[in-house]
């Protein structure tokens, strides 16, 4: 004890501080250092009585104080160093995460800026490979059956020699990509588990780490993204999180590109079909126009000679012959009306050069007078409600077109109204729109057929034994003529034997 006290008395504080630093570095706890000082006092208590004086223990307390000082100073330095290390690691991690988020955002911007699938995929692999400093990036997309995935785009010098575009992998196979697609999960692998020469392998020669992530949108898997590095253990959980963001963005972009491609393909098919239909429509119109022109001359000759025969200018006819001539005249007149309707439909958009102001009231009154004889002979009462309006609307149109609209409406109503029925003709104004309304108490229209009455060649009774003649062009002509002047048509009926109401709206000229 005496020797130890002499040793302590000769110790410089620097040495005691170094002892404290050593205790800290070997991992001694603060409590152990405190206990060390207490034990020193107990040890020195074994000295002769004259050493037990308070001043005799002063070297012990001084030594322990400097040891404790060294220990605390080293402990503080160690803590600060550890904190700096943690801060640096956090900064590095944050920087990595920021870079990955920025890269993911950049990939997202690049991929959503195009709807062309090939451009999108090539842009994505180049960008991912460059930003993440990878040795290889590839995108595999599944086929329609889902049994195979095909390499659609890749980037990286090692990939070009060993994995050609359209390289096929079985989705139920042992490749990293196949297992990722089949299991709908990320697959992280170190060192190739298969030979890179095997066909069913996504590994690239020289790669030591591979991460495969499935491309999923909704409940559908589109394929997988494979990223590879020549560095062993290159991918951490943080990398996986960053790549997951990229993969989610990429899957949505691929889905949008697929939808766009499907829509464009359908649009192209529809455009081709439309052009074909338009060509067929033109051929049909040309055919109808040619036939109509070819029919008009012989019809004129037939009617002319029939009228000569009917007037006995070519000799006297008996009753049966006269009846036969009347049949010829009646059907030739019907055929002439049909030809005229066809010609009018063909000329709807080609006769605007003769447009002029047309007074509707005067035209309607004239048409009503013309139909009075026909209506009376059919036992139909023709009622005019035109004079009930003070308006005198004028439309700018081809007079023949407006006249045909009115005549077809009134003629159609008289034709389908049995004896004892009524036909009301009315003219109203709806702002600057003139509305011609023809309402009858005739045979009516089945509800399911109302929407088709303005179709070309449509007839409510299309059977071979139908009671009413006509080719079904009259109302179609009304609709097409009205619409050619910016107007519209409507038809209403409560059903069979409940009559029908037809309306034609035409824009008028400013008063």
Image (cartoon, rainbow, N blue to C red):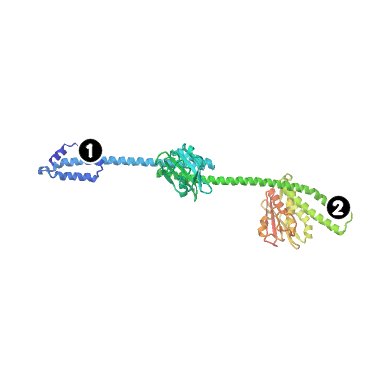
Residue 295 horizontal side relative to residue 81, left or right: right
Question: Where does the image place residue 403, in percent across and percent down from the top left?
Answer: 74, 51
Residue under label 2: 308
- Label disc, if present, on residue 258 of the rendered structure: none
Question: Where does the image place residue 89, in percent across and percent down from the top left?
Answer: 36, 41
Disc 2 to disc 1, C-alpha distance: 144 Å
Label total for image: 2
Q: Quadrant of the N terminus?
A: top left
Question: Where does the image place residue 507, in percent across and percent down from the top left?
Answer: 68, 50
For numbered disc 2, what is the local secondary structure?
A: helix
Q: Residue 235: name its quadrant.
A: top left
Q: Residue 178: in sight, yes or no?
A: yes
For numbered disc 1, what is the local secondary structure?
A: helix
Query: Mark 1 packing: few (<14 Cα in 10 Å), some, or many (20+)?
Result: some
Residue 36 horizontal side relative to residue 358, left or right: left
Q: Residue 387: in sight, yes or no?
A: no
Query: Mark 2 packing: few (<14 Cα in 10 Å), some, or many (20+)?
Result: some
Asked whether the beta carbons under mark 2 and mark 1 sit within 8 Å of each other, the answer is no
Front residue of 450/298: it is 298
Question: Where does the image place residue 65, in percent across and percent down from the top left?
Answer: 20, 41
Q: Residue furthest right?
A: 315
- Label disc, if present, on residue 18 of the rendered structure: 1
Q: Residue at x 75, y 54 (%)?
A: 407
**Nearest to N terminus: mark 2 or mark 1:** 1
Front residue of 293/180: it is 180
Compared to residue 424, the image places residue 269 above or below, namely above
Residue 47 horizontal side relative to residue 461, left or right: left
Q: Residue at x 29, y 42 (%)?
A: 79
């Amino acid at each position: 004890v005496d020797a130890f006290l002499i040793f302590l008395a000769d110790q410089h504080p620097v040495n005691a501080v170094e002892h404290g630093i050593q205790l800290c570095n070997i991992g001694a706890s603060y409590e152990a250092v405190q206990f060390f000082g207490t034990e020193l006092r107990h040890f020195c208590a074994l000295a002769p009585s004259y050493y037990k004086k308070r001043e005799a223990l002063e070297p012990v307390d001084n030594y322990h104080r400097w040891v404790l000082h060294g220990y605390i100073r080293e402990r503080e330095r160690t803590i600060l160093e550890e904190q700096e290390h943690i801060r640096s690691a956090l900064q590095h991690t944050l920087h990595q995460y920021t870079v990955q988020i920025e890269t993911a955002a950049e990939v997202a911007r690049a991929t959503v800026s195009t709807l062309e699938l090939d451009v999108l995929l090539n842009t994505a692999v180049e960008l991912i490979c460059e930003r993440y400093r990878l040795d290889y990036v590839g995108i595999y997309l599944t086929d329609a059956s889902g049994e195979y995935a095909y390499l659609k785009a890749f980037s990286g010098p090692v990939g070009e020699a060993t994995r050609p575009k359209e390289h096929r992998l079985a989705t139920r196979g042992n490749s990293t990509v196949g297992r990722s697609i089949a299991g709908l999960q990320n697959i992280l692998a170190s060192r190739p588990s298969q030979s890179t020469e095997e066909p069913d392998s996504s590994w690239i020669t020289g790669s030591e780490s591979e991460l495969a992530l499935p491309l999923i949108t909704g409940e559908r898997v589109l394929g997988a993204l494979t990223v590879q590095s020549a560095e062993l253990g290159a991918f951490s959980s943080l990398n996986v999180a960053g790549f997951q963001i990229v993969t989610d963005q990429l899957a949505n972009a691929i889905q949008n590109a697929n939808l766009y491609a499907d829509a464009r393909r359908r649009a192209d098919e529809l455009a081709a079909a439309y052009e074909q239909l338009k060509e067929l429509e033109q051929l049909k119109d040309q055919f109808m126009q040619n036939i109509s022109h070819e029919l008009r001359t012989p019809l004129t000759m037939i009617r002319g000679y029939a009228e000569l025969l009917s007037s006995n200018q070519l000799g006297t006819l008996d009753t049966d012959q006269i009846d036969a001539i009347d049949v010829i005249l009646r059907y030739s007149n019907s055929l002439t009306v049909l030809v005229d309707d066809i010609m009018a439909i063909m000329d709807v958009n080609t006769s605007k050069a003769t447009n002029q102001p047309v007074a509707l009231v005067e035209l309607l009154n004239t048409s009503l007078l013309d139909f009075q004889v026909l209506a009376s002979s059919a036992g139909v009462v023709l009622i005019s409600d035109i004079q009930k309006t003070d308006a005198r609307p004028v439309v700018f149109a081809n007079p023949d077109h407006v006249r045909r609209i009115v005549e077809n409406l009134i003629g159609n109503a008289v034709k389908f109204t049995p004896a004892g029925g009524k036909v009301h003709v009315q003219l109203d104004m709806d702002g600057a729109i003139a509305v011609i309304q023809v309402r009858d108490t005739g045979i009516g229209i089945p509800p399911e057929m109302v929407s088709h009455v303005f179709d070309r060649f449509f007839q409510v009774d299309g059977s071979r034994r139908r009671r009413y003649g006509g080719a079904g062009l009259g109302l179609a002509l009304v609709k097409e003529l009205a619409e050619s002047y910016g107007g519209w048509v409507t038809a209403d009926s409560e059903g069979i034997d409940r009559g029908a109401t037809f309306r034609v709206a035409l824009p008028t000229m400013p008063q």
